[in-house]
Image (cartoon, rainbow, N blue to C red):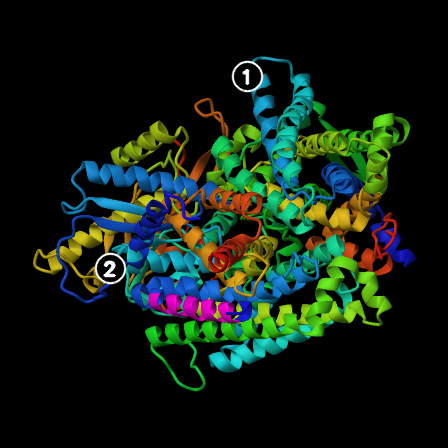
Amino acid sequence: MTQPRIELLLALLGAAAMVLAAMATPWLKFVLTLALAKGIAVLGIMLLLRAGQVSFGHALYVALGAYTVAFLAPSMPDAALLLVAAALGTTVAGLLIGLFVSRYREIFFGMLNLALSMVFYSMLEKFYHYTRGTDGIRVPSLTVAGVPLDRVSYEWTIFGMALVLALGFGVFARVYLASPLGQALSAIKTRETRLDFMGVSSRNVLLSAYVLSALMAGCAGALIAMTSRHVTPLLAYWTASGELVFIAILGGAGGVLGPFLGAAAYELVRVYAAATVADMWQMILGAVLLLVILFARGGIWGLLSSRLQRGRVA
Amino acid sequence: MGDWFEQNGALLGLALLDGIASAALIFMVAVGLNLVFGVLRVLNVAHGSLFAIGAYAAASIGLFFTSAGLPAWASLPALLLAAMIVGLVLGPLIERLLLRRIYSEEPVLQLLVTFALFMILEDAQKLVWGVQPVSFSAPVSLMGTVDVPFGADVIPYNTYQVILLPAIAVATLIGLALFLRRTLTGRVILAVTTDREAATAMGIDARKVYLLTFTFGAMLAALGGALSTPTASLVPGIGASTIVLSFAVVATAGLGQIEGAALTALMIGIGRSIAVTFQPELEVVVPYLIMVAVLLVRPQGLFGVVETRRV
Amino acid sequence: MPSSFQPTRRQALAAGFGSVLLPSALSAQAPAQRPSEIKIGVTTFLSGAPSVFGVPGRNAAEMLAEEINQSGGINGVPVRLFFVDEAPGIDHLVGEFRRLVQNERVDVMLASISSGSCLACTPLGEELRKVTLLWDCGTQRIFEERNYRYAFRTQANATPEILAPLLYLLKTKPDFRTIAVLNQDYAWGRDSWEIWKTAMDALKPGVRVVAELFPRFGATDFSAEVTRLLALRPDVILSTSWGGELDTFIRQAAERRLFERSTFVLPLAESSLERVGRSLPAGHIVGSRGDHWHQHPRPANPQALQRFVENYRRRYNAYPIYPTYHMAQAFSALRAAYAKAIAANGGNWPSDAQLAAAFPGLEFESPTSRMRIREDGQGLEPQLIGTTVHNDRFPFAVMDNMVVFPPEMVTTPAGQNSVNWLKTLTAEMVNRVPDPIRAG
């Protein structure tokens, strides 16, 4: 089998495993929906990593997507419409901000994204009368495509939406990375000047990836808001952005499956850590990250794919 | 405009004084981060943890001195001692055990190693010092206040904040500049900052320079923390808020630029205190607005140099 | 290359996941059997700045659970605690809430220090039909915006906690003309100022607000703010800040003699008194989010208060602060509710719904008084406000001239919106404030 086929097969297997797990344990469905949502956001981070650029501020788009849902939900209480609205809103924001930040590289790119997300975080707290500050906004119960649902079927629907979006974005990212535009992304990382010599605008290449990543983060934010049903400014804090980069490395930046593997592992480790030592979860997560970087640099996906390769050779 | 200054000139003067005092602390933390970044090319998130640990250690040592019956003036060297101990113990430990393994890796991995370390130290701090606010304000009480005239009124200021802190910051700035430009070790560090490849090609032992710089940076972070102890109660999470601010300073200043860090710290400190005086709601976003504005005009930061692009 | 220890590792993993993936036969309304233990989920801050309240809250919970179990449990059933850290954010908190309810099968949730957490957990508890006791959060919005069948509050809310110190100020130092506020920039800081301002405009119209300062949440330096306040010389400075920030503000204000220029009103300062020592001068107004004070002048049961204070001090080497009392109230209410529900159920163990039905109108003991939960779920808690004084018994400022406000006086009537209610208050209310009690 070819690499993409194996990936697709693994993705379908993973999806089936998630559905089974969610059926067996109701609360796990919640955690897995969040993991899928974060995986989608991390997929965007991964596109930027291909170009060698690390955004330390993508929580901005997650929070923007989530707050779009929270703000519009009272007047438009439908999950499908809200998802579209969040996607549109974050794409536009990503384009406007992207025009500015795509001129910068490396630490400046990272820090500008960080700064903008912190400005957004402060605004969510400052405009207290609109955002209710740290109290956050509760998302009312939503219909899906016009159909009102009870709690359990609503949870399943959002879980299904997250799964479909994850698969969709995953396939899309695969195609995008294989296209000339996607190939040019890797060139930004290695020898950017050569792109310019070839007449390709490296800025536009990065911008396209940036807007895509904003869209993905926005959809992730919308899903998070619809799942946890309560949004707070903490979604935009810099540690939330750090978490996304963390997951990208944990999962492995190689294939499009990495982000989802990473997100599921991250959420489960956090839950286990919190369940065993409620006040030391940070230390445990930090230690896991450290071990992955020092001893398994390819992340979970790296471990998995090297094992598959060996299997095929044998 | 003239009228406005007549009415608010005195207030502006007070805001400048506050701004300089807070700029001194911002500079102390950011300059270490910037130095480390300039040489090692690692953006050290754990710099915030070193700040926090330095602050807590200063409180512990200070309180120990007090309980041991040492005279009040001993509280000042206590701060310095704490910074030295934290820097000399944790600095080499982190550099040798962690950073050394990842110099050849991608920047994102380096950054995440320090992020992981930050998460671990955040909880470790809690294990050692607990969660109840810790404080040690003896140095402030020791130095008393100075009265600054304000119209017919006087405004008391802490001598510690408006005189000692800026003096230490200026001394650090001058000392660092002299060290980097006049001593052999300093020049070696500077050479590695400007062009790592050329420096190593000329036979400079980069590993030694890294160890030295990181230890020094850790000491500066801890000193920044120790110097903030006398005026602030220490709680979990102080490292996290310090580090974002320092990031903004580094990017605004230009990588590795100590004068840039000083100027940026001054802009942020004064900008914030002016905001508190006239438009308090703007205070939080001031550092980021300054950073975005500076980078729009100078994409390499205030003092940054354009790096040659590789072909 | 399969290594020899691989099977064991798989087994270990499988064992780990077994507890997570345990198939669950959910049956919320099943007839309840007397359980082998009562499982109590507690959400509190275990990291970050708010852990200055969260950890004492957890300490108190552990102490109380141990005491309950030593004395034979609640109606013969021992209790077991599960803690959740609120610090990682709402999505994690809500996930853990679900895990505790759906997987660990807790019998009751004690929710949250942060108002944001309470606002997220309360509707979830309702959806999952699990009794949720709001043990510490401040927001008054919960029961004013919605009705709940499973959520109850075993303490007061922001409205009485802010109205009481205002009334105290109006009674003891009525002649102020200017005021400035310095609150943390987050929901509590903003909400409490709105409550104060609305009530002040109704009770004493014409007071001029000279500065509204909302420094960043988690700020470690208030020098610029102190300068501003020194220059403005307001008669009164209000700050509802807490924790490290309040400590820092008190110390910086004291060093620069701001306390000599203005009267401070610090509604949460009881929790900082021991830490700031004598930095806090005499003659300023402090509160404790309730009637929580280890030197309470007239506790309903002096022995009970003394026992609570001494036990806590022995275990944790500090005086108990208000979150510990709030935790004690939640445990006491739970105990009383079980007794009431079991009696109403003919001596049989109550279901979730039957337990919930016991809370409206429930009366229970707090360490300092006897409390009641109103029909709308809101707890009626007295408020104790005092003026600081220094004496030889304590190395820190303590309260004197204490007024204990009866809850009916300062709590928004059921079914009304706090801000609207505060607008209807009149200056006559000050005359009804009880007389101050001198410290013993």
Which amino acid does the dot numbered 1 rest on? Ser
Q: Which residue is mark 1?
A: B67
Q: Which residue is mark 2?
A: C361
| Residue C346 in the figure: left or right of residue C258 | left
User: From which residue to which does the magenta span run?
Assistant: A5-20
User: What is the x, y in percent for residue A55?
Assistant: 67, 58
Please tell me whether mark 2 sits on a helix, a strand or a loop: loop
Chain letter behind tag 1: B
For disc 2, the neighbor class at 10 Å (few under 14, some 14 to 19, many from 20) is some
Chain letter behind tag 2: C
Distance Cα–Cα, label 1 vs label 2: 53 Å
Residue C439 against residue C28 in the figure, above or below:
above
Residue at 26% across / 56% down in the picture? C105
Residue at 61% across / 37% down in the picture? B98
Residue C198 appears in the rendering: yes
Which amino acid does the dot numbered 2 rest on? Gly
Q: Quadrant of residue B134?
A: top right
On whether residue C87 falls in the magenta region, the answer is no
